[in-house]
Image: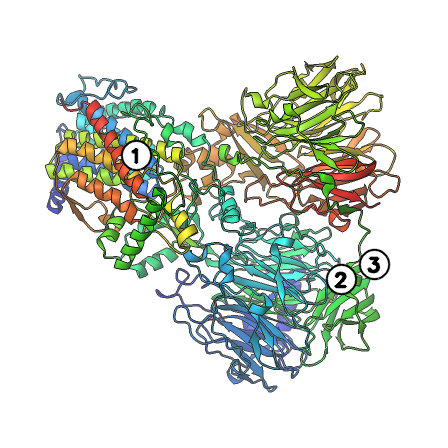
């Protein structure tokens, strides 16, 4: 009877599944069917609640493993305040509660994470349960239940020296010293006190209760080796997630720790000598801020583990706008400069491993950045298509970061109850909104993308879901999910993939005492495709999954080979492996494995020049911060320098270099000698240091065979008719440079290019502008200047003058009539093609779509190698909170909305047909105070489209600019008509700001080197720091810069140039607010 | 006082009853000083809810008071209009003598209406207003309608004048730029690290002072971390006093004084992800509260009550403009930043450091100005019991004079660990200068 019931339920579900369109991958197994009636109920009291203990809602733990060696994974739940429970898997999704006889109920007041591991190496899984002890009267200690082999356990933590009585959240087993036994990383958490926000120096003070610990297994006794091993164990570590993996593939397990609040995450690289080095800053441009659970898995099939670290950014518009957001940009600078913390932003981070180089953080691009108050993330191939999917649990009983609560609660209630704090607590709790929301499920796709399948693959349960473990509960080959819920029974999501796709389950029979083979790696190869996994069970959040490795292989029946690398750095290979079964693998004549073989990559083409050819230029950006003046603008315009120009400034036949300075910093010139570049001052330039030099050209403009200079000023700081906005024209005369008259227009220069447009033998100019100072959103003026015997004058051209917020331009004969035409690109506009007709320019429509972008750069290049010229376009990429498509373009409304004589811009993105501002009420009201009168609560404001916020009338009056496309890519030339083709996602992680055409690899064909990154945004977007550059050889061959010797990550690259010394070419990279770097070319 | 309140409510009930039983509906609507106090109190309550910063709050007080005052000055020969005395204030529209206008009622209506325009949560004022409107209308519809029309007309007039004070323009002006590398310069302070508040308040059009810089104080002691410098000594003094009184405990007189005068509208309380604001009234609101106490102690009638509020609020508003001008001129760092950096990284001031530069002390300037004006109105040695902070859980304190209260308010900022001595001592002088100018220039009482 009992056995039949789940089958009946299953059948029923299948029928339902057939009759509905919904493609549910998982179905819920109900407690009355499974027998799993555990409920992690927490009891809020006046003395113990979320106000007193910050992690009161974090929930309990869950661990999966076969404790009775019957081939079926059993389930252990730890309860915060209720007794722990152990359920024996009887098959057919029926479980028996053996808690009472098993002696695992627990004696601590407040249990947290639970993991399984064979601590004593007897072939039986033991259970370790963490506890918070010493707070709020919590007593007890972490408990270790040693498995007696008869479904009973003996609590033995003290005997193993694992009876820690600290603030533990979880633990992970690993063999960090490769001595064959299991050691432990114990994750502890601090509790919030105002005093702990005092800078990174606090990390040096070790604290027993709050500090993490590395515990070395010395023959069954765990010794705290944290200090000598270099593990930080301070008062400021808010450890909520630990992910063990060999991140640098050297054979030694490394550790990523996710820390909540202001403390940076820790990235520990194992030095192989019993010590670790914390290297977060060296490998991560930024990290999650309120870091919670995490996971490591190879999601892009390159054989290296990637990392996800969760945060709490809401996806829902209402929750988003009524919750506290990121720091403002000045607070972030303080946090960094005064307190020493790294860049941290409030969103989930997905860090793609770049093999001993800076990780590529793609959370926003991959579509997994916002999953609300998130606890556990687990990568696995749930649908067995060969691509890792992602399951994220979330939810919070009450949202303490609700802005209405923060700002308005206190006045009405806290004050009147000041003398009755208990009453105050209850009322405070009651007035926080609930955060019970649906979990997220993403289907992994090619190209670093994830598709949101929440509500389709999994039931749309609104719960507070936390610790999660994976295992094959019904032994049908696919992975099932067990979730510990707060104040509710656990969710058992049973995977219905069944026979629809192939799987392979691997269990290891490794050497005692690490029998299950923690740390074993498997490379599965099939048809040129790789999948890589590493066995660590403590994953996600406060949980441990079944100790096995699971692969999905779509519909293939056999795979080419499996390479197993054992923890002792030996390996063996299995070939022609049949699928859809569970393999038990034990060491079988393994051979030493050469880890260096994993480090092979393409031949480097670049090498940093040690002496930089004598060029010691460092650009310093002045302190002007656009956001302080124009609080609502989407990005800065003051950090687009410096200018750089190459040319012979002293008539010695050798090219020299000009670098512009920001406001208040003089430009610098470096003269080429036979051995190096030497800085020498040019008097006229030094006198113009008040200007911000953004663009420059060195050329002979007056045909006297001597090079002159035109320097374009910008910077966005000077406004209206202020002299420093004027561009400068210097003519060389007897070795000196003298100012010469130049047309006066007060614009922020953004691009300046020279060409003899009228073929009269001298060089004419185009000077583009990207923005109007203090009036962002207004269209600046761009001009063509005709040269007559060295004298420039504006060529009137209305269409070109108002073409848009231009950032770049090229002269190129796009119509093949022998005259160089002008192509301009810019932000909030489409590429525009102006045909040259003997010096007059008229716009031509040559594209098959509108293609408004945030374009930053354009270069001609035959990328598809079909003989005509295509145009590569640098855009902002998709790794930001901007969102744009042809169907739902991003909009920037522009007007003086509050009628005070100054304009504002409001950037909105589309969601289900409505437009919502990116910024919240406080930001908008900082410019338009009346919004505070219209919306007297955040609840009233949240979820309102811009039309409701400003009112239809005001909005209709406003002008707006749009963006359809954020991706970088190229305009493919088909007989003079152009179609846009985006680059793949690795090239969309940051704005591409510069291209350089050159034959870098010496194959006789020009390549294009693309560089970028950009930091001129608020912490709302974060920092676009991850782009390592890319060598674009053809439409299918693009090699990331970090593979070929370039160090471009974390640098906002302004320009790439080829310079020479002794006829030898070098690559010069000019970087905003950083030191210029020269690379040798190794071709 | 409690007796009095009771009487008032009895009276109100009586009025309502009479109004309801009255058939002819022609009785004169009586407007008591209590009604005006109630309107001021309501505005304070809404400001606390909405979270108005001290300088902005001073603006919310002053314009409604002036509107009310100008109305009563039309009809009370003992008061001079401020027209021309505040150079940019023109004469308000004259009332139509033929209509049955109740001037105190019109004044109160104008006060309520302008207050509503200035705060955010209008509904809270509307509910208060409508309950009064019902009573008045029932008592004498014609008089109510005529007075209301006039009151609103004056409120519109004063509103137009108010809108030209550069408030709207300052909303779009630049934020204060933080430079973490310049240690002399003000930095945001724990725990919320808020931006510098109202960096352009010095550009708000003043009332009586000629310009925000008219009483530009001496510069603060030259920044130096040399132990013999006066700056360092003043910094050390803040640290030492704080340690000393902390040792003495919460019951020590200095701690009580610091807490009594905290007047911080937004004290950020953080517990994990939980943040909330412990809110109080502003320094300006505290002195408005003292004005109320003085009026009641003296049993001032309606017109004198409006006069007292108006003059006090003008002095307070100008004091903030004067003070803020200096704050963002000297941009001086707060003691907390330096003490944490050089002396004790765990040190916290007894009061939470408010989010703007240190010099001069806002509370000192405002207290100096308000006390000078109140002394002028009510006389020196005017003893009073200050119960203004009772709704915020603080005790009643007694003072022998307004100046004594101002002195205590000023020194409280040192006890609180948020100001150096110079900011307090110079600040109170700066405030007295503002107050004396207001006393000297404004001839309000004939």
Residue B85 or residue A871, whichever sits in front:
B85
**Where A42 falls versus B359 (above or below)?**
below
Quarter of the image with the C terminus of chain A in it? top right
Question: For the point 57% across and 72% down, which residue is it?
Answer: A225
Left or right: A102 as drawn, with respect to A1011: left
Q: Are marks 2 and 1 on the same chain?
A: no
Query: Residues at marks 2 and 3, common chain?
Result: yes
Tell me the distance, in whole angstroms, between the alpha carbons under discs 2 and 1. Answer: 67 Å
SS assignment at label 3: loop
> What is the CA distance from the residue labelled 3 to the residue labelled 1?
74 Å
Point out residue A900 in the picture as x, y percentages from the top left corner: 44, 25
Residues behind callouts 3 and 1 on a single chain: no
Tell me which residue sits at (25%, 44%) in the image: B411
Q: Identify residue for label 3.
A: A528
Could one spot residue A493 in this view of the protein?
A: yes
Which numbered dot is residue A531? 2
Marks 3 and 1 in Cβ contact (< 8 Å): no
User: Separation of disc 2 and disc 3 at Cα?
Assistant: 10 Å
Q: Chain of mark 1?
A: B
| Figure quadrant of residue A685 | top right
Residue displayed at 22% across by 49% down: B390
């Amino acid at each position: 009877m009992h056995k039949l019931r789940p089958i009946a339920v299953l059948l029923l579900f299948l029928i339902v599944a057939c009759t509905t369109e919904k493609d549910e991958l998982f179905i819920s197994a109900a407690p009355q069917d499974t027998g799993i009636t555990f409920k992690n109920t927490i009891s809020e009291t006046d003395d113990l609640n979320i106000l007193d203990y910050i992690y009161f809602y974090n929930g309990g733990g869950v661990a999966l493993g076969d404790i009775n060696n019957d081939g079926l994974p059993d389930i252990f739940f730890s309860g915060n305040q209720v007794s722990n429970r152990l359920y024996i898997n009887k098959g057919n999704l029926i479980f028996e509660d053996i808690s009472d006889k098993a002696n695992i109920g627990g004696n601590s007041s407040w249990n947290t994470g639970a993991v399984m591991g064979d601590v004593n190496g007897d072939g039986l899984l033991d259970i370790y349960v963490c506890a918070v002890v010493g707070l709020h009267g919590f007593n007890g200690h972490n408990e270790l239940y040693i498995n007696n082999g008869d479904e009973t356990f003996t609590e033995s933590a003290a005997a193993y020296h694992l009876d820690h009585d600290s603030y533990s959240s979880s633990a992970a087993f690993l063999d960090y010293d490769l001595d064959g036994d299991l050691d432990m990383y114990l994750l502890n958490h601090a509790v919030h006190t105002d005093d702990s926000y005092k800078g990174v120096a606090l990390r040096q003070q070790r604290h027993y209760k709050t500090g993490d610990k590395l515990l070395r297994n010395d023959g069954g006794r765990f010794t705290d080796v944290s200090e000598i091993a270099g593990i930080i164990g301070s008062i400021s570590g808010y450890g909520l997630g630990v992910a063990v993996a060999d991140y640098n593939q050297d054979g030694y397990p490394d550790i990523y720790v996710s820390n909540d609040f202001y403390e940076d995450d820790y990235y520990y690289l194992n030095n192989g000598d019993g010590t670790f080095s914390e290297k977060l800053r060296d490998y991560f441009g930024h990290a999650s801020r309120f870091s919670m659970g995490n996971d490591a898995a190879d999601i892009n099939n390159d054989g290296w583990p990637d990392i996800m670290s969760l945060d709490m950014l809401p996806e829902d518009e209402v929750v988003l706008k009524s919750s506290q957001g990121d720091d403002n940009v000045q607070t972030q600078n303080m946090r960094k400069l005064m307190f020493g913390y790294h860049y941290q932003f409030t969103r989930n981070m997905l860090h793609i491993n770049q093999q001993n180089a800076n990780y590529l953080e793609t959370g926003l691009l991959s579509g997994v950045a916002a999953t609300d108050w998130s606890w556990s993330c687990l990568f696995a191939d749930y649908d067995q298509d060969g691509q890792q999917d992602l399951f994220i649990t979330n939810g919070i009983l009450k949202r303490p970061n609700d802005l209405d609560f923060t700002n308005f609660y206190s006045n009405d209630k806290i004050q009147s109850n000041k003398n009755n704090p208990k009453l105050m607590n209850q009322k405070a709790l009651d007035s926080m909104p609930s955060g019970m929301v649906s979990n997220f499920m993403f289907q992994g796709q090619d190209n670093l993308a994830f598709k949101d399948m929440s509500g389709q693959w999994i039931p749309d349960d609104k719960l507070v879901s936390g610790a999660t473990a994976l295992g094959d509960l019904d032994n049908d080959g696919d992975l099932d999910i067990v979730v510990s819920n707060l104040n509710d029974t656990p969710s058992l999501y049973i995977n219905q993939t069944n026979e629809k796709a192939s799987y392979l389950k691997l269990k290891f029979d490794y050497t005692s005492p690490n029998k299950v083979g923690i740390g074993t790696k498997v490379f599965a190869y099939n048809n040129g495709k790789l999948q890589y996994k590493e066995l660590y069970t403590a994953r996600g959040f406060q949980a441990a999954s079944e100790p096995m490795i699971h692969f999905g292989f779509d519909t293939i029946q056999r795979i080419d080979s499996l390479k197993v690398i054992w923890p002792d750095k030996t390996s063996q290979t299995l070939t022609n492996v049949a699928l859809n079964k569970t393999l038990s693998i034990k060491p079988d004549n393994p051979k030493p494995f050469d880890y260096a073989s994993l480090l092979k990559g393409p031949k480097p083409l670049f090498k940093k020049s040690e002496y930089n050819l004598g060029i010691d230029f460092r650009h310093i950006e002045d302190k002007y911060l656009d956001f302080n003046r124009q609080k609502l603008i989407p990005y800065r315009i003051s950090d687009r320098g410096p200018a750089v120009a190459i040319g012979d400034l002293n008539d010695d036949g050798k090219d020299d270099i000009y670098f512009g300075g920001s406001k208040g910093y003089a430009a610098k010139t470096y003269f080429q000698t036979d051995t190096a570049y030497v800085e020498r001052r040019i008097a006229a330039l030094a006198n113009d240091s008040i200007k911000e030099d953004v663009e420059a050209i060195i050329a002979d403009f007056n045909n006297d065979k001597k090079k002159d200079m035109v320097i374009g000023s910008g910077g966005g700081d000077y406004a209206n008719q202020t002299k420093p906005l004027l561009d400068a024209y210097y003519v060389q005369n007897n070795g000196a440079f003298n100012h010469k008259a130049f047309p006066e227009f007060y614009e922020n220069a953004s691009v300046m290019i020279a060409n003899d447009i009228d073929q009269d033998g001298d060089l004419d100019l185009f000077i583009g502008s990207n923005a109007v100072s203090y009036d962002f959103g207004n269209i600046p003026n761009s001009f063509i200047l005709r040269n007559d015997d060295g004298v420039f004058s504006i060529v009137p051209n209305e269409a070109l003058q108002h073409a848009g917020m231009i950032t770049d331009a090229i002269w190129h004969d796009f119509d093949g009539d022998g005259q160089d035409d002008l192509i301009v690109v810019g932000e909030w506009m489409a590429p525009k093609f102006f045909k040259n007709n003997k010096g007059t320019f008229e716009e031509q429509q040559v594209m098959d779509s509108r293609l408004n972008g945030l374009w930053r750069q354009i270069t001609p290049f035959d990328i598809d190698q079909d003989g005509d010229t295509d145009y590569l376009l640098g855009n902002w990429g998709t790794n930001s909170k901007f969102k744009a498509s042809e169907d739902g373009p991003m909009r920037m409304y522009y007007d003086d909305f509050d009628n005070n004589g100054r304009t504002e811009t409001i950037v909105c993105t589309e969601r289900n047909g409505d437009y919502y501002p990116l910024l919240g009420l406080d930001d908008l009201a900082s410019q338009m105070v009346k919004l505070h009168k219209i919306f007297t609560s955040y609840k009233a404001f949240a979820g309102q489209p811009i039309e409701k916020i400003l009112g239809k009338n005001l909005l209709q009056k406003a002008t707006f600019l749009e963006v359809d496309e954020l991706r970088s890519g190229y305009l493919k030339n088909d007989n003079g008509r152009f179609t846009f083709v985006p680059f793949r996602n690795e090239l969309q992680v940051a704005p591409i700001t510069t291209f350089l055409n050159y034959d870098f690899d010496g194959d006789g064909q020009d390549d294009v080197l693309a560089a970028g990154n950009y930091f001129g945004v608020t912490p709302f977007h974060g920092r676009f720091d991850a782009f390592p550059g890319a060598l674009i050889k053809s439409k299918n061959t693009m090699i990331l810069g970090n593979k070929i010797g370039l160090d471009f990550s974390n640098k906002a690259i302004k320009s790439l140039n080829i310079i020479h010394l002794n006829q030898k070419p070098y690559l010069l990279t000019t970087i905003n607010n950083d030191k210029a770097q020269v690379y040798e070319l190794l071709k | 006082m409690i007796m009095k309140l009771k009487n008032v409510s009895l009276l109100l009930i009586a009025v309502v009853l009479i109004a309801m039983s009255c058939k002819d509906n022609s009785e004169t609507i009586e407007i008591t000083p209590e009604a005006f106090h109630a309107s001021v109190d309501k505005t304070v309550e809404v400001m606390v809810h909405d979270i108005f910063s001290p300088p902005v709050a001073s603006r919310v007080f002053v314009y409604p008071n002036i509107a009310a005052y100008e109305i009563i000055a039309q009809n009370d020969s003992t008061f001079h209009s401020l027209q021309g005395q505040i150079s940019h204030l023109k004469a308000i529209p004259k009332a139509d003598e033929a209509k049955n206008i109740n001037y105190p009622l019109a004044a109160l209506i104008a006060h309520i209406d302008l207050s509503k325009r200035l705060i955010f949560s209008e509904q809270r004022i509307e509910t208060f207003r409508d309950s009064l409107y019902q009573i008045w209308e029932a008592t004498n519809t014609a008089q109510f309608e005529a007075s209301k029309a006039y009151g609103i007309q004056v409120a519109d007039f004063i509103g137009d004048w108010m809108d030209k004070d550069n408030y709207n323009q300052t909303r779009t002006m630049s934020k204060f730029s933080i430079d973490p590398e310049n240690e002399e310069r003000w930095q945001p302070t724990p725990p919320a690290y808020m931006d510098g508040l109202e960096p352009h308040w010095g550009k708000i059009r003043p009332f009586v002072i000629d310009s925000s810089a008219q009483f530009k104080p001496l510069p603060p002691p030259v920044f130096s971390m040399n132990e013999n410098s006066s700056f360092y000594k003043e910094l050390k003094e803040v640290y030492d006093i704080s340690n000393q009184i902390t040792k003495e405990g919460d019951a020590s007189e200095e701690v009580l004084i610091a807490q009594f005068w905290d007047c911080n509208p937004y004290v950020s309380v953080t517990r994990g992800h939980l943040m909330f604001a412990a809110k109080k009234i502003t320094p300006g609101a505290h002195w408005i509260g003292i004005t109320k106490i003085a009026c009641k102690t003296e049993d001032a009638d309606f017109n004198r009550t409006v006069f007292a509020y108006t003059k006090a609020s003008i002095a307070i508003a100008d004091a903030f403009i004067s003070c803020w001008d200096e704050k963002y001129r000297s941009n001086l760092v707060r003691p907390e930043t330096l003490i944490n950096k050089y002396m004790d990284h765990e040190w916290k001031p007894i009061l939470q450091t408010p989010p703007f530069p240190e010099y001069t002390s806002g509370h000192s300037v405002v207290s100096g100005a308000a006390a000078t004006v109140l002394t002028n109105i009510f006389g020196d040695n005017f003893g009073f019991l200050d119960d203004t902070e009772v709704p915020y859980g603080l005790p009643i304190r007694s003072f022998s004079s307004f100046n004594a209260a101002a002195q205590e308010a000023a020194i409280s900022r040192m006890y609180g660990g948020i100001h150096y001595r110079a900011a307090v001592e110079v600040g109170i002088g700066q405030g007295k200068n503002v107050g004396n100018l207001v006393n000297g220039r404004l001839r309000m009482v004939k």
